[in-house]
Image: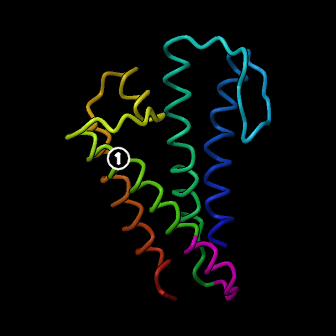
Amino acid sequence: MIALSFLIIYLLHDISKAIVGLLCGGNLEFNHGIKIVNANYGNFSYILNLILGISIPVLFLFALVLIFNNSLRNGLYHKFTLIFFMCSVLSISVCLIFYPLISLFTDLGLHTELDELLEATGLSPLVILLLSLLITTLLIKLASKKNLFKNI
């Protein structure tokens, strides 16, 4: 279930980027993931592509937590939702909290999509860090309110 959770997060990320690529006139290729070729990105669509790759999985997680029904007696439903939530929060933490925190002090030289977003927008890693902490806190509070952690 953990591998399936990470696969869903990965697919949501790539599908959102593919949609922007298609809207910009690109074609899709499937080779070790979804690759967009021949897309004509302007500055706005390039930034939108980077933002959607990050935000669509997070929005999906918010929707999943909002529709979570604790009164259902399906154990698999509860376990999968909890595992997906934990994997998603872990992904957010590593990619959008720890990486910006470390990059405040040193250049990691990884050239990730987050680096591209920071370079294209001119934002400080501190802004991403604070927004990510806020989103993660809201997700955990919402999940707690919906009793997602009740059956741990």
Circle 1 SS class:
helix
Q: Is residue 21 rendered to the left or right of residue 45? A: right
Residue drawn at x 40%, y 20% as measured from the top left: 120
Q: Does the magenta portion include 73?
A: yes
- Residue range in magenta is 72-83
Compared to 126, does 19 lie above or below?
above
Q: Residue at x 56, y 49 (%)?
A: 57
Q: Position of residue 74 (x, y in %)?
A: 70, 85
Picture layout, residue 50 above or below residue 58 = above
Q: Residue at x 67, y 87 (%)?
A: 75
Q: Amino acid at mark 1?
A: Tyr
Vertical arrangement, residue 9 with respect to residue 46, above or below: below
Which residue ends up furthest to the front in the rendered image?
A: 109
Residue 54 falls left or right of residue 67 = left
Residue 15 highlighted magenta (yes or no): no
Which image quarter: residue 14? top right
Q: Which residue is mark 1?
A: 99
